[in-house]
Image (tube, rainbow, N blue to C red):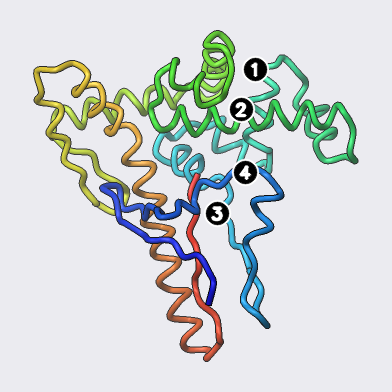
């Protein structure tokens, strides 16, 4: 039918990975997005778990500031951006919610940097890798990371606890008891140990998010069948 379809593979965390082609990592370019076209008499409907991994981190860490920000309806990434770039959150939020302007474009770019930093940070990226992911100097990447730790101090304690637990037990575990054994922790090569420690950080968060998403997808598919709708699940995209 002339359509391009992806292939899915399940990885250790429980996530599904897309390849040939990878449709989970498409460029932020409107021209690329225009190639995604629904079948005749069909349309695409998007569901989004907003900040799912960050919300999971809030629960796992018990950080009152992070939980409070969510309960107050604040934009978490705008909060971090305001701290990193020394701006008033209320002013930044108002600009971001307002009409098009150069200032809005600037604040939106700063927010995107903070968002990328938050996810890279939660997945255990080093300062160098964080800077590479953000496309900024290491000094700015460190400043953004320090802003995250300053705003939500219990995240650092959570990471220490996750690593200590993994070293003690030999595996990382998500909220639903899915285990990921980390044999690299016993390696004599420091680089392999460091990679295992990084997995100890990101697995509880990433794997919990994956299981929540897969459970929702399974329930949704059953519901669509029960309702007799000519609909199906096309693509899962994660941060």
Q: Is tag 3's residue or tag 2's residue first in the polypeptide sequence? A: 3
Against 148, residue 78 (above or below) is below
Spatial CA distance of label 1 from label 2 is 8 Å
Residue 128 falls left or right of residue 106? left
**Mark 2 and mark 1 in contact (Cβ < 8 Å)?**
yes
Q: Which residue is mark 3?
A: 49
Against 198, residue 7 (above or below) is below
**Dot 1: element:** helix
Tell me the quarter of the picture where residue 197 sits: top left
Spatial CA distance of label 3 from label 4 is 16 Å
Q: Which residue is mark 1?
A: 84
Mark 1 Cα-neighbour bin, 10 Å: few <14, some 14–19, many ≥20: many
Q: Is tag 1's residue or tag 2's residue first in the polypeptide sequence? A: 1
> Is residue 4 or residue 158 the one in the foreground?
4
Q: Which residue is mark 4?
A: 71
Provide residue 135's location: percent of width, then percent of height.
57, 22
Spatial CA distance of label 4 from label 1 is 22 Å
Q: Is tag 3's residue or tag 4's residue first in the polypeptide sequence? A: 3
């Amino acid at each position: 039918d002339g359509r391009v379809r992806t292939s899915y593979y399940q990885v250790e965390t429980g996530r599904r990975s897309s390849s040939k082609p990878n449709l989970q990592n498409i460029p932020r370019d409107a021209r690329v997005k225009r190639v995604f076209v629904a079948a005749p008499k069909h349309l695409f409907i998007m569901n989004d778990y907003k900040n799912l991994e960050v919300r999971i981190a809030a629960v796992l860490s018990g950080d009152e500031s992070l939980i409070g920000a969510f309960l107050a309806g604040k934009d978490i990434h705008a909060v971090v951006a305001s701290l990193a770039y020394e701006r008033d959150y209320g002013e930044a939020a108002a600009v971001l919610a307002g009409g098009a302007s150069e200032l809005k474009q600037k604040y939106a770019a700063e927010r995107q940097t903070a968002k990328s930093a938050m996810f890279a940070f939660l997945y255990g990226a080093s300062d160098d890798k964080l800077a590479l992911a953000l496309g900024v100097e290491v000094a700015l990447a460190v400043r953004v990371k320090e802003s995250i730790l300053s705003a939500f101090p219990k995240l650092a304690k959570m990471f220490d606890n996750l690593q200590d637990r993994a070293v003690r037990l030999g595996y990382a575990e998500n909220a639903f008891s899915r285990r990921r054994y980390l044999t690299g922790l016993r390696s004599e090569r420091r680089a392999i140990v460091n990679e295992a420690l990084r997995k100890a950080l990101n697995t509880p968060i990433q794997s919990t998010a994956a299981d929540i998403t897969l459970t929702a997808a399974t329930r949704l598919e059953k519901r669509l069948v029960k309702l007799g709708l000519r609909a199906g699940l096309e693509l899962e995209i994660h941060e």
